[in-house]
Image (tube, grey):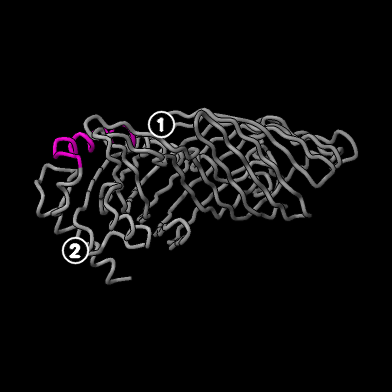
């Protein structure tokens, strides 16, 4: 693996050094004359690829990161009485779609995948401040008195954080990823309305209404490698194949400040459902670099088509032309994101399995995990 990586770096470096400094897309090799693209066309390809594809791709990743960062502590129980601890993973994604990119002077790129995804791990704990100072309140005890609006029994605080590094490989998608995660955050939830039994105690119970806000910080560093084959229908009528590896580097820092309201019901003891929504204010950055390098050849080149079908790719003396493109960019973190949230808890005594779903325009988020609550 190391010798292959070294060869890739060597080829990339030699091509870059032999090319004009201003060129961000270029063909190198004796076979480039058979490719119906001039350098002007390739320069156009670079700018159009940015405009039609990578700008949206980077923004989709940034938007997915914002959705993942909204979720932190679980909200399925709406209001805490004592404390809870657990672990979860949240994710955000913009649905994948295949795009057709029309490049003036070059041709049409077909079936180019686009979308965004982001994931964040969480280890969290939460406590009701009234319980913490010895002023516990049970809203489901008919003998208890409702606390005042300023009572600490109406306030829950949560803290969350995690960091780790992961190596991921998926052979059937030719995908390799090294990712480092870091997150910290806290939330404060106020019991706007306390819960109450409706019928049969926990068989049918109103969980109350809570108003929450918080601060969530996440950082992500990803190095990804994936092999893909592009088909380009050139304007000359010749179909061109561009095999190659995509090398993606992502560094993000996202801060979110959500404000939300939640309410829910407990049904037949086992199931708790809550719904709500809110808006989050966000800041940060999502810096990305995408490099694609690989052999390029016309569909009429029988030898190279056979080599590609046989699994020979990228580093081979048999290919006589390589196309390289390098694009750097910054995904825009959406400043404000309104969202709707649905949460479900499965109650197994003090243990709970929970899942949350978040929906907003063009993107979705989820948070799932396990915890204990008393």
Reply above or below: 211 against 185.
Answer: above
- Are discs 1 and 2 less than 8 Å apart at CB? no
Residue 52 falls within the magenta-colored stretch? yes
| Residue 305 location, quadrant | bottom left
Of circles 1 and 2, which is in front?
2
Magenta extent:
36-53
Residue 75 on image: x %, y %: 64, 41
Q: Is residue 33 left or right of residue 274?
A: left
Between residue 160 and residue 276, name the one nearer to us: 276
Q: Secondary structure at mark 1?
A: loop
* Residue matched to label 1: 334
Element carrying mark 2: helix
145 or 166, which is in the foreground? Answer: 166
Q: Position of residue 163 (x, y in %)?
A: 45, 58
Q: Nearer the viewer, residue 178 or 149?
A: 178
Report how many numbered discs are placed on residues in the image: 2
Q: Earlier in the sequence, mark 1 or mark 2?
A: 2
Q: Residue at x 65, y 48 (%)?
A: 133
Q: Residues within 10 Å of mark 2 (few under 14, many from 20)?
A: few
Q: Position of residue 168 (x, y in %)?
A: 45, 61
Q: CA distance from mark 1 to mark 2?
A: 38 Å
Most frequent secondary structure within the magenta stretch: helix
Q: Residue furthest right?
A: 200
Q: What residue sits right under mark 2 in the picture?
A: 10
Q: In the image, is residue 274 above or below residue 289? A: above
Q: Residue 115's quadrant in the figure? A: top left
């Amino acid at each position: 693996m190391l010798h292959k990586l070294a060869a890739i770096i060597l080829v990339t470096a030699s091509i870059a050094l032999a090319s004009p400094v201003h060129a961000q897309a270029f063909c190198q090799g004796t076979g480039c004359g058979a490719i119906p693209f001039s350098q002007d066309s390739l320069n156009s390809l670079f700018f159009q690829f940015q405009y039609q594809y990578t700008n949206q791709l980077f923004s989709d990743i940034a938007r997915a990161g914002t959705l993942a960062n909204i979720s932190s502590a679980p909200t399925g129980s709406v209001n805490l009485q004592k404390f809870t601890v657990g672990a979860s993973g949240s994710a955000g994604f913009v649905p994948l779609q295949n795009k057709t990119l029309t490049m003036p002077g070059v041709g049409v790129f077909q079936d180019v995948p686009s979308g965004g995804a982001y994931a964040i791990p969480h280890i969290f704990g939460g406590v009701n401040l009234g319980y913490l100072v010895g002023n516990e309140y049970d809203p489901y005890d008919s003998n208890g008195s409702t606390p005042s609006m300023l009572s600490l029994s109406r306030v829950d605080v949560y803290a969350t954080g995690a960091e780790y590094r992961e190596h991921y490989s998926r052979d059937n998608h030719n995908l390799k990823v090294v990712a480092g995660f870091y997150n910290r955050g806290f939330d404060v939830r106020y019991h706007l309305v306390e819960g109450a039994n409706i019928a049969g105690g926990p068989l049918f119970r109103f969980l109350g209404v809570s108003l929450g806000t918080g601060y969530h910080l996440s950082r992500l560093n990803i190095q990804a490698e994936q092999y893909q084959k592009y088909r380009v229908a050139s304007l000359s009528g010749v179909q061109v194949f561009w095999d190659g590896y995509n090398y993606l580097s992502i560094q993000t820092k996202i801060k979110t400040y959500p404000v939300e309201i939640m309410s829910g019901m407990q049904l037949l003891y086992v199931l708790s459902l809550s719904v709500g929504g809110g808006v989050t204010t966000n800041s940060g950055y999502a810096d990305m670099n995408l490099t694609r390098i690989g052999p390029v050849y016309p569909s009429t080149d029988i030898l190279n088509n056979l080599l590609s079908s046989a699994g020979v790719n990228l580093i081979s003396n048999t290919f006589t032309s390589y196309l390289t493109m390098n694009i750097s960019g910054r995904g825009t973190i959406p400043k404000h994101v309104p969202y709707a949230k649905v949460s479900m808890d499965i109650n197994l005594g003090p243990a709970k399995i929970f899942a949350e779903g978040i929906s907003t325009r063009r993107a979705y988020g989820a948070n799932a995990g396990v915890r204990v609550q008393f």
